Amino acid sequence: MCGRYFIDRSAELKTVINEMKTSVLVKLWEKTSTIVTEGEIRPTDVVPVIALNRRGESSVFPMKWGFSGKPLLFNARVETASTKPSFRNEWLTHRCVIPASNYFEWSHITGADGKRRTLDKYSIKPEGENVTWLCGLYRFENEMPVFVILTREPGSAVSRIHDRMPLIISKDMINEWIRPDSDPDMIVTRALTDVTLEKCC
């Protein structure tokens, strides 16, 4: 599961944000929403997302986190995204990458009464990396782009605190992921699972 992530103002992310600001979608979103470019990001926020433009080039657009529904869909399981009606078309043609500094996850414990309780909050990012490139899917709702973040079974480090983690790729795989003519199933096998966890407040 991925329900929170963080954007800092590092030089690399600042470049991404500045590119997003040139999108014509900025003014359209600003009529109804605030575009968030720094701090902790939550579902329904409008944030920078990398996808192909109409010319087939990698570009940065403001998109809202979550497919509408009851409940709101803000994650999609990579194991079933290609077959579920909510995601299968996007799996083939509308893949995107969400830039982040890190994402957050909470450890849980099941008590004697069977209830699951939330414990510590952790900041997580790939080992040796300053930017976390999260894989997602997007579609258009009311002619505006919205996205979900893909999740997968966790690597060994995350498995100690949670049973899911986001699908994370290296920077040099971004263009391959967002191209509709590439094989997403093959790319998934090269995802990053070695991460560092830091307990935060």
Image (cartoon, rainbow, N blue to C red):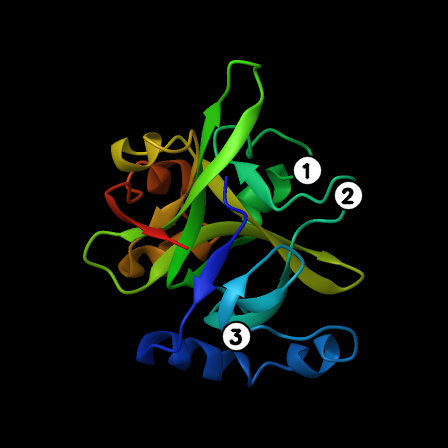
Please report the residue visible at 42 percent of the width from the left and 62 percent of the height from the top: 100
Real-space Cα distance between discs 3 and 1? 28 Å
* x and y, in percent, of residue 91 in the image: 55, 42
Dot placed on the residue nearer the N-terminal end, 2 or 1: 2
**Residue appearing at x 66%, y 58% in the figure:** 146
| Amino acid on which the number 1 mark rests in the picture | Ser
Outermost residue, front side: 112
* Viewer-side label of 2, 3: 3
Q: Is residue 16 visible?
A: yes
Q: Mark 3 highlights which residue?
A: 37
* Residue type indicated by callout 3: Thr
Residue most toward the left? 128
Residue indicated by mark 1: 86
Q: Earlier in the sequence, mark 3 or mark 1?
A: 3
- Mark 1 Cα shell of 10 Å, populated few (<14), some (14-19), many (≥20): few
- Marks 2/1: CA–CA distance: 10 Å
In contact (CB < 8 Å): disc 2 and disc 3:
no
Disc 2/disc 3 C-alpha distance (Å): 25 Å
Q: Nearer the viewer, mark 2 or mark 1?
A: 2
Residue 192 image point, x, y percent: 28, 45
* Residue position for label 2: 69
- Density class for disc 3 (Cα within 10 Å; few <14, some 14-19, many ≥20) is many
